[in-house]
Amino acid sequence: MERNFKVLKRIADIVASHYEVHPMSMFPNNRLNHFAEIRQVFHYMATKHTKASLQEVGDFSKAMGRKKAHNHASVLHSVKKVTGFIDVDKKYKEELDELENRIYKAVSLINESSKVRDSHVQEIIEVVFGEDNLEYLELVHLLVEKIYVNKNKEELSHLIFLQHKLNNERIYKASQVDTGLGMV
């Protein structure tokens, strides 16, 4: 649901921006026609560009401040209503095609970054679960915990630099010992 929420939020932001309203205003506790039409466009785009169920799309309304979530039937009604307008109004279709293009690009970017993140997480899991040395694993756990608490990219980059430098120094010293070079 977290990934769906992130994508739904991005879609809501784009739709709200397109209609020049605040995203939360699309989900009022009343049926004002202007906001209902914008919300219907959101429901249409959300069902088209996410894997979220109709109920998840409806539940998003509550997450955006509405007292009660829209049920799946309301979302389905919105989708059918927008589809009907698209079928009969060429100008409306063109407007939604433009909006859909913006949404497609944004959602693709979110999905791509999620794939990269998932790949990195999988690599970390494979490396860590392949380790048998419990003491080493405890140290790695402590290091990750400390890095995660700070979430400081500069410190992390500096740690990587220091580790790289240590590895290079070990290689240099090992090559001196093996070849006898550099010894006085």
Image: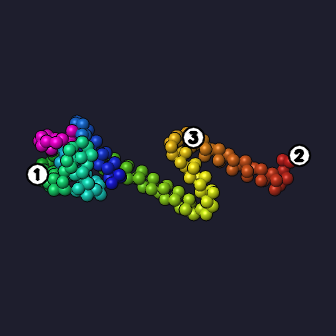
Q: Is residue 148 visible?
A: yes
Quickly name the residue at label 2: 184
Q: Nearer the viewer, residue 149 or 17?
A: 149
**In the rendered structure, does residue 31 fall within the stretch colored magenta?**
yes
Marks 2 and 3: which is nearer the front? 3
Question: Would residue 180 appear left or right of 127 to someone viewing this image?
Answer: right
Q: Residue at x 49, y 59 (%)?
A: 122
Looking at the picture, which amino acid does disc 3 mark? Glu
Q: Position of residue 173 (x, y in %)?
A: 77, 50
Could you say where residue 153 lies in the image, as x and y percent from the top left? Answer: 53, 41
**Badge 1 is on which residue?**
88
> Which residues are the magenta region?
25-37
- Left or right side of 26 for 136: right
Q: Is residue 95 visible?
A: no
Viewport quadrant of the N terminus: bottom left
Structural crowding at the residue carrying mark 3, measured as other residues with C-alpha within 10 Å and reported as few (<14), some (14–19) or many (≥20): few
Earlier sequence position, callout 1 versus callout 3? 1
Q: Secondary structure at mark 1?
A: helix
What residue lies at 55% left-to-right and 62% top-to-bottom? Answer: 129
**Separation of residues labelled 2 and 3 (CA atoms):** 37 Å
Secondary structure at badge 3 equals: helix
* Residue located beneath label 3 in the image: 155
